[in-house]
Amino acid sequence: MKKYLIEVEHDSDKKACEEAIKVFLNTGSHFMTHADWGCMDGEHKAWITMETDRREDALSILPPAYRRKARVIELTRFKLEEPDGITPLHG
C-alpha cells in the first residue's frame, strides 16, 4: 500500500481558520480529527497522512469544499542500503 501526505490549504483570516478546523473535527473521521495544523505558525494548512492504494482515495477523504486546494503527495522512504533507488526518478 502507498502512503500519501495530504496538504489542505485554507485562507489565513481567523474566520477561515476556525471554519476549517470545525469542519475537519466535526466530520468524525479519524483522518480529519488527527490532522496537523500550521496556523499557529502562520502556515494556514492542515496535513494528514494515510495509507491507501490510490491517490484518488486519499483525496476523497476530504470534505468536498477543501478538495480543490488540496495536494496529495505520494511519500517514499529510502533505505541507506538502497542508495540507487532514487536514480530512475531523475533520469
Image (cartoon, grey):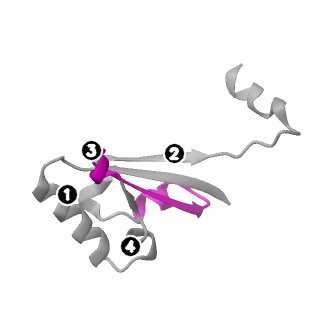
Mark 4–mark 3 distance (CA, rounded to whole Å): 20 Å
For image coordinates 28% across by 53% down, the residue present is 40
Which residue is at the far right?
81
Q: Nearer the viewer, mark 1 or mark 2?
A: 1
State the residue in front, 69 or 56: 69
Q: Which residue is mark 4?
A: 33
Q: Tell me the number on the disc at residue 42.
A: 3
Whichever of labels 1 and 2 marks the residue nearer the N terminus, that label is 1
Pointers 4 and 3 in contact (C-beta within 8 Å): no
Tag 4, which secondary structure? helix
Looking at numbered disc 4 in the image, what kind of residue is underneath it? Thr
Looking at numbered disc 3 in the image, what kind of residue is underneath it? Gly
Image quarter in which the N terminus is found: bottom right
Tag 3, which secondary structure? loop
For image coordinates 12% across by 55% down, the residue present is 14
Pointers 4 and 1 in contact (C-beta within 8 Å): no
Whichever of labels 4 and 1 marks the residue nearer the N terminus, that label is 1
Whichever of labels 4 and 2 marks the residue nearer the N terminus, that label is 4
Q: Which residue is mark 2?
A: 73
Q: Nearer the viewer, mark 2 or mark 3?
A: 3
Q: Nearer the viewer, mark 1 or mark 3?
A: 3
Looking at numbered disc 1 in the image, what kind of residue is underneath it? Cys
Q: Which residues are magenta?
A: 38-60
Q: Nearer the viewer, mark 4 or mark 3?
A: 3
Mark 4–mark 1 distance (CA, rounded to whole Å): 15 Å
Q: Which residue is mark 1?
A: 17
Q: Position of residue 67 (x, y in %)?
A: 32, 54
